[in-house]
Image (cartoon, coloured by chain):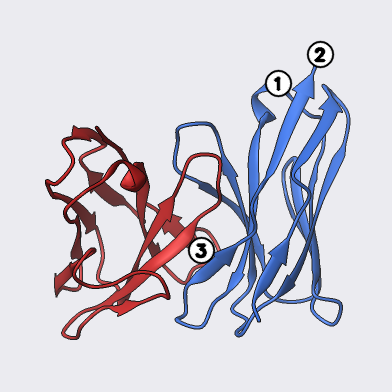
Chain colours: A red, B blue
Amino acid sequence: SAVISQKPSRDICQRGTSLTIQCQVDSQVTMMFWYRQQPGQSLTLIATANQGSEATYESGFVIDKFPISRPNLTFSTLTVSNMSPEDSSIYLCSVDFQTPSYGYTFGSGTRLTVV
Amino acid sequence: GQNIDQPTEMTATEGAIVQINCTYQTSGFNGLFWYQQHAGEAPTFLSYNVLDGLEEKGRFSSFLSRSKGYSYLLLKELQMKDSASYLCGGGGSQGNLIFGKGTKLSVKP
């Protein structure tokens, strides 16, 4: 199997607060990826999370705003810090299971609304 | 630079065949992937090509030409439930995928 469990599925948060999103994989994987999908847009990579090292962030994303943890080979968290309405998006974790049947698989996503 | 292009919208009729094209320029190449995404849901993996040629999976087929940086997704016997966005994704610099903006397909009766 190739299962990714992501939670919460959705949340409505007050501006200035933080939300931590969790991603659990049912097998050990080297890299986990965190994406953002703003309304009506495609997927944008936030960062790559490797176990045992700091995450690698894409241009426009910084660790202070999106801290990531990767304590082991099956789990990762993404925190959206000091939220503003512009952070309202769907956040998705993704894993490359490196098999033809699954390819890069996404978690079910977290729909975040900041008010 | 890295770029993936695909049409923004397409419309087709139930029972017909539709081809969604994708051109790409990416820093790495670990295959060309196609995903289906219904509104409000996460993308679902459909197909991928790592070698040139056609891969067939039931009603869905995907084609790749690496020399041309070109792929297409072919959907046959269209059904109303095929109305969705279709995302083309290819190799990024971190072993991840980068994606086109997606093609919104509307299937009409």
N-terminal-most mark, 1 or 2: 1
For disc 2, the chain is B
Q: Residue at x 47, y 79 (%)?
A: B95
Q: Which residue is mark 3?
A: A103
Q: Residue at x 44, y 65 (%)?
A: A45
Q: Are marks 3 and 1 on the same chain?
A: no
Q: Which mark is residue B55?
A: none
| B83 over B68 or under it: above or below | above
x then y, percent, for residue B47: 64, 56
x then y, percent, for residue A52: 16, 84
Q: Are marks 1 and 2 on the same chain?
A: yes
Q: Quadrant of residue B34?
A: bottom right
Q: Are marks 1 and 2 in contact (CB under 8 Å)?
A: yes
Q: Are marks 2 and 3 in contact (CB under 8 Å)?
A: no
Q: Which residue is mark 2?
A: B109
Disc 3: CA contacts within 10 A as few (<14), some (14-19) or many (>=20): many
Q: Amino acid at mark 1?
A: Met
Q: Residue at x 40, y 70 (%)?
A: A60
Q: Which residue is mark 1?
A: B80
Q: Residue at x 87, y 36 (%)?
A: B17
